[in-house]
């Protein structure tokens, strides 16, 4: 299992986590390594232990319902739903349990409300509003009086750590917005906040002093070269838990033999300059240049476009005013520009970036849609739309020249669509994965579809496969189309 989201128990004996490829909640004994799957019938995320370690609260991916599961000897009874949001409160973050053992702190992103929800009957008590912050990685202080969180969003390259009083009052910055900082948690005393920062040139572990929710101005470096980390929480004895994020600092180009499948040692290597996380790369049509995206944080919208020419070893970077999504990424048909997707203010745009000057041109902008890909000439763009009335997803082709739209595929109700690099090299097909909801379609099969870009018969490339079937070795797994391959023919 690969932990996707998790938290240690208050006594540090167990670790509750969800997996990237599973639909259940797991408990791992940190002393013996033994793991156990809990009886949770829906995809879960954001697990949070009660202070006494007897219950776990979590949020369901489908519907953002808050549930509680009781732990007794690591056996789990059926999860109990305590709160189901309406459409106005559908965006929420579970921050943690309050010290009274019977209530949970939740942030509603759309209405910017901080609220207390009873773990007994689900009653909601509004506490305050908070704007301009991200609660997705927030940490509740040991006494439950303050929340430490980050400003901005995950797409922001520089963010500051702030402290918000739960009961109301002013928000106080703990670190400077000029730094690239990552919140890790509170010290057990509540008198300082732990965070990772690259202010010294590498990501190090720091401590910042706090008194009554305000900064003391005291900073201390505790450990150097911590690396990029993902906060997971802390225990009652003060132990800090975090995950290490793998950083790709170099681009390695190797030769693959199509006869025996052997990969030779790296043929050429290029660094990604000053940025320290590599995202995706794509070759120019003539094979002479490699374009890549990189960033200084784990953002899904990198702000640096790099170009590397293996023939002469030249490498240059372009700082993007509008960060591009990590995928898809391609060269224009003439090989002079890079095409990528950007998302700001509820709109998605297809951008064309000159690979030398960095000049950016908006080719198309859409609302309430997700851009999936485009043809090599960028004159046809493929988007995913969500029909709120029928609650299904559909894929459309948009003619960028005349604005006309054509529906290519419509999923059945209860199925989700996903893709990464969907357009085939020749532009004739889209590779789209469909997977059923384990809550509403547990008996259905996932599919890997080849959809003609001009419309027509859709092909299913997989044998019937139920990712949520009780007798399946792949139970809880989904099918994701990643990339087309060119055949030798």
Image: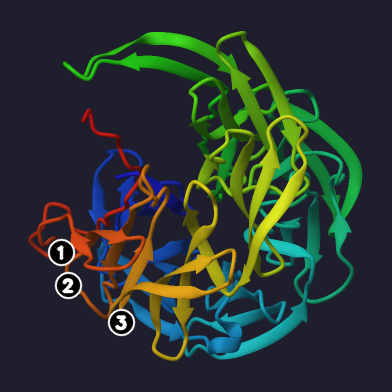
Rendered view: 402 above or below 488: below
Q: Which residue is farthest front?
A: 402
Q: Can I make out residue 220 in this image?
A: yes
At horizontal 60% and vertical 71% (from top left) the residue drawn is: 98
Estimate the spatial distance between the alpha carbons at disc 1 and disc 2, rounded to whole Å.
6 Å
Q: Say whether disc 1 or disc 2 marks the residue closer to the N-terminus.
A: 2
The answer to whether 16 appears left or right of 277 in the picture is: left
Find disc 1 in the rendering and name its residue. Answer: 466
Find disc 3 in the rendering and name its residue. Answer: 413
Q: Nearer the viewer, mark 3 or mark 2?
A: 3
At horizontal 35% and vertical 43% (from top left) the residue drawn is: 483
- Between 221 and 282, the residue placed more toward the observer is 282
Find disc 2 in the rendering and name its residue. Answer: 444
Estimate the spatial distance between the alpha carbons at disc 3 and disc 1, rounded to whole Å.
16 Å
The answer to whether 261 appears left or right of 82 in the picture is: left
Check contact, mark 3 vs mark 2: CB within 8 A: no
- Between 227 and 252, the residue placed more toward the observer is 252
Q: Nearer the viewer, mark 3 or mark 1?
A: 3
Q: Say whether disc 3 or disc 2 marks the residue closer to the N-terminus.
A: 3
């Amino acid at each position: 299992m690969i932990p996707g989201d998790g938290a240690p128990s208050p006594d540090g004996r167990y670790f509750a986590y969800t997996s990237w490829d599973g639909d259940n909640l797991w408990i791992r004994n940190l002393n013996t390594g033994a793991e156990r799957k809990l009886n949770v019938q829906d995809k879960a995320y954001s697990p949070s232990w009660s202070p006494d370690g007897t219950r776990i609260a979590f949020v369901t991916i489908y519907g953002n319902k808050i549930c509680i599961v009781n732990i007794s000897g690591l056996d789990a009874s059926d999860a109990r739903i305590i709160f189901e949001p309406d459409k106005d409160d559908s965006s929420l973050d579970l921050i943690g349990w309050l010290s009274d053992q019977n209530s949970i702190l939740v942030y509603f992103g759309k209405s910017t409300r901080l609220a207390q929800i009873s773990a007994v009957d689900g009653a909601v008590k509004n506490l305050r509003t908070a704007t301009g912050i991200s609660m997705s990685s927030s940490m509740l202080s040991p006494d439950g009086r303050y929340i430490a969180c980050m400003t901005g969003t995950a797409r922001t390259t520089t963010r500051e750590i702030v402290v918000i009083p739960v009961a109301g009052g002013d928000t106080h910055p703990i670190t400077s917005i000029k730094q690239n900082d990552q919140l890790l948690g509170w010290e057990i005393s509540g008198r300082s906040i732990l965070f990772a920062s690259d202010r010294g040139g590498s990501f190090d572990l720091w401590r910042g002093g706090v008194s009554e929710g305000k900064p003391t101005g005291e900073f201390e470096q505790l450990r150097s070269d911590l690396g990029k980390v993902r906060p997971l929480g802390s225990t009652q004895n003060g132990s800090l838990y975090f995950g290490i994020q793998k950083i790709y600092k170099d681009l390695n180009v190797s030769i693959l033999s199509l006869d025996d499948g052997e990969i030779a040692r790296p043929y050429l290597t290029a660094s990604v300059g000053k940025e320290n996380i590599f995202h995706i790369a794509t070759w120019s049509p003539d094979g002479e240049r490699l374009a890549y995206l990189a960033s200084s944080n784990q953002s899904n919208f990198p702000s640096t476009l790099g170009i590397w020419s293996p023939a002469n070893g030249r490498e240059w970077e372009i700082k993007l005013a509008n960060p591009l999504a990590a995928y898809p990424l391609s060269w224009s048909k003439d090989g002079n520009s890079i095409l990528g997707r950007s998302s700001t203010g509820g709109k998605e745009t297809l951008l064309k970036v000159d690979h030398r000057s960095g000049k950016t041109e908006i080719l198309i902008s859409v609302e309430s849609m997700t851009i999936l890909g485009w043809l090599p000439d960028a004159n046809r763009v493929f988007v995913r739309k969500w029909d709120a009335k029928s609650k299904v997803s559909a894929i459309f082709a948009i003619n960028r020249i005349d604005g006309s739209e054509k529906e290519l595929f419509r999923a059945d109700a209860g199925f989700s669509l996903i893709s990464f690099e969907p357009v085939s090299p020749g532009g004739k097909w889209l590779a789209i994965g469909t997977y059923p909801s384990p809550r509403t379609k547990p008996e259905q099969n996932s599919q890997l579809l080849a959809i003609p870009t001009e419309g027509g018969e859709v092909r299913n490339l997989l044998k019937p496969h139920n990712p949520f079937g009780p007798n399946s070795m792949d139970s809880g797994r989904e099918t994701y189309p990643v990339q087309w391959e060119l055949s030798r023919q």
